[in-house]
Amino acid sequence: MPFLLFFIKQTALEAFILKVKVKYFAIFREITNKREEELEVKKGATVKDLLEALAERYGKKFRDLVFNGEAVSDRLLMLVDGVNIYSLNSLETKLSENSTFVILPPVGGGG
């Protein structure tokens, strides 16, 4: 019986959790020391929720790049499943099971 209770509890918890892949580039790769990782987020989590969780996880340097005070920097390129979040619901874009989130810092150039 204990195994059955564990299974039921585990199944119930899984109903509230999504797995999301996060891909890092440039300075974000240096800060996290990762190219990508899979994270669990609450069902209904938004891009902003994910960014706040990542800032909590990776500290001040990450937070300073992503946030301008309480607002998220508008200089970043962020994609959910290959689509710019500003073409979706911006920071309120909801993440789905197996979504891929990509974050890129500002890129300069010119000649």
Image: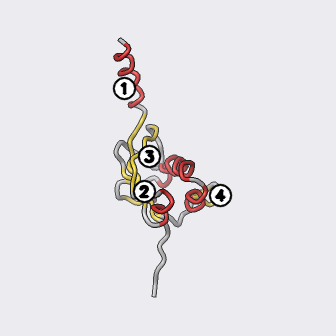
Label 3 or label 1, whichever comes before in sequence order: 1
Q: Which residue is mark 4?
A: 69
What's the distance in space between the residues labelled 1 and 4, CA to CA?
Answer: 39 Å
Determine whether the residue tagged by mark 3 lies in a helix, strand or loop: loop
Label 1 or label 2, whichever comes before in sequence order: 1
Which residue appears at 60% of the width and 60% of the height?
64
Q: Which residue is mark 1?
A: 11
* Residue 37: x %, y % from top left: 40, 50
What's the distance in space between the residues labelled 1 and 2, CA to CA?
Answer: 30 Å
Which residue appears at 40% of the width and 39% of the height?
18
2 or 4: mark nearer the eye = 2
Please name the colour scheme applied to the rendered image. Answer: secondary structure
Label 2 or label 4, whichever comes before in sequence order: 2
Label 3 or label 2, whichever comes before in sequence order: 2
Which one is nearer the viewer's eye here, 9 or 35? 35
Q: Which residue is mark 3?
A: 94
